[in-house]
Amino acid sequence: MKSSVLRHSLLLTLALGLAACGGKATFPVEGKVVNLKYSGLVLSNIGMNDLPVDAKATSFRFPNTIEYGVQYDVKVKTSALHQDCTPDNNTDTAGRQASISVTITCRDYTYLLGGNVKIVGADGAAKPYVGENLVLINGSSDRIKVAKDAQTYKFGTAIAFGTSYGVSVLQQPDGGKLVCSVDRGIGEMGDAEVTNVNVLCREK
């Protein structure tokens, strides 16, 4: 508390000193960027031109400064591609703190992965799935037990854009009457939920 009071007093003294000389203290509007991977991020602030931020940037700074006592409000005008970017500590009045420091945090969009489940009979005709204890796995850890009589399935863990996936059968259905395989099990997550990683089970 004591440190905060001293800091504010120092800023006030500086501003009063500059005012006596015919000027005002000015502050750059700047901050850090966390986890920005892609292009497209554009920031805005009151009375300033929009600021594009390069992919993988870790900081930003508007080219102009603002005077002591002027309000700032940094917003995300356009989020980065494939990410949701949000500001923190983004609105206040210049001079209330020793400096203006806004944090922009970007989080990857994530989507679920799944598909249909069906049996292909000896005659080639599709039938509803009726197996039990079929287990699928994505990668080395994310797994799901397909419900009896299920027509579709989805893994519970959402996957970020650009992340590779590889779905395979970890455990065949009980009884030994069905042999299941995965169609289109390898791919890379795009900008939408994947619903065509299908499981095809054949009768012995």
Image (cartoon, rainbow, N blue to C red):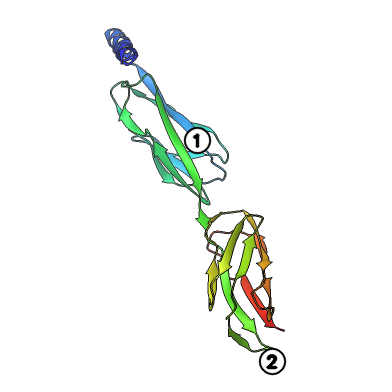
Q: In the image, residue 193 lies at what x, y percent?
A: 53, 63
| Residue on which the image places disc 1 | 33
| Residue on which the image places disc 2 | 123
Sequence-first disc among 1 and 2? 1
- Of all residues, the one furthest to the bottom in this rendering is 123
Does residue 64 appear to the left or right of 137 in the view shown? Answer: left
Q: In the image, residue 96 lies at what x, y percent?
A: 31, 22
- Of all residues, the one furthest to the front in this rendering is 175
Q: Quadrant of the N terminus?
A: top left
Q: Residues within 10 Å of mark 2 (few under 14, many from 20)?
A: few
Q: CA distance from mark 1 to mark 2?
A: 58 Å
- Relative vertical location of residue 82 with respect to residue 71 in this rendering, above or below: below
Res 11 quadrant in image: top left
Q: Is residue 100 visible?
A: yes
Q: Residue at x 66, y 87 (%)?
A: 121
Does residue 200 appear to the left or right of 19 in the view shown? Answer: right
Q: Which mark is residue 129?
A: none
Disc 1 residue type?
Val
Q: Quadrant of the C terminus?
A: bottom right
Q: Residue at x 57, y 74 (%)?
A: 116
Q: Residues within 10 Å of mark 1 (few under 14, many from 20)?
A: many
- Relative vertical location of residue 39 with respect to residue 90 in this rendering, above or below: below
| Towards the viewer: 126 or 77 | 126
